[in-house]
Image (tube, rainbow, N blue to C red):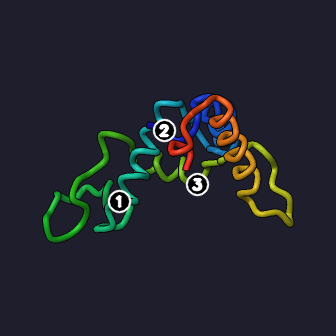
Amino acid sequence: MIFLPRSYIEEVLLVATNSAIEGQPVSFGEFLRWLGIWYLLAMNHCASRREYWSSMPIDMFQGAPFQLHDIMSGSRFEAILSAIRLTNATPSDYQDCFIQFLITWKQFIYQCHELGIPQIMTK
């Protein structure tokens, strides 16, 4: 389950990210693959990020426990990582760069309450 509404991902996050990325734009499906890889890497601290795309054979004593070549290339993953934007607002020089995302998130939580989504789902 995605923690952000699809409309937010397509209309804000991907538009802002695609304006910053070099090369081919990121599609919704590719973003989901990227997000899944990012989650996987966050949960597995046994190897450096680049080792998941290594051409070395999988070994139980060194490197990553599996490889991600079939899902996304390492260079594409890094390109999306460097271009990812959570908001389409231009950050000011004096403001926290996550403030617009925080504002959007609070609006999302408010809409969940207005739609009757249980409070346990929004904590």
Among the two numbered marks 3 and 1 on one chain, the one whose residue lies closer to the N terminus: 1
Name the residue tied to disc 3. Answer: 82
Label 3: element kind: helix
The disc, 1 or 2, on the residue closer to the chain's N-terminal end is 2
Tag of residue 100: none
Q: Amino acid at mark 1?
A: Met
x 70%, y 47%: residue: 106
Residue at mark 1: 43
Mark sitting earlier along the chain (2/3): 2
Taking the image as shown, residue 67 lies to the left or right of residue 122, namely left
Kindly report the distance in space between the C-alpha atoms of the residues bearing marks 3 and 1. 20 Å
Q: Quadrant of residue 65?
A: bottom left
Give the quarter of the image for residue 64.
Answer: bottom left
Local secondary structure at mark 1: helix
Q: Which residue is mark 2?
A: 2
Left or right: where does residue 30 sit relative to residue 54?
right
Q: Is residue 115 above or below residue 97?
A: above
Q: Residue at x 63, y 44 (%)?
A: 21
**Which amino acid lies under the numbered mark 3 shown in the image of this protein?**
Ser
Mark 2 residue element: loop
The residue located at (30%, 40%) in the rendering is: 70
Task: Say which residue appears at 65% left-offset and 42% top-offset.
Answer: 109
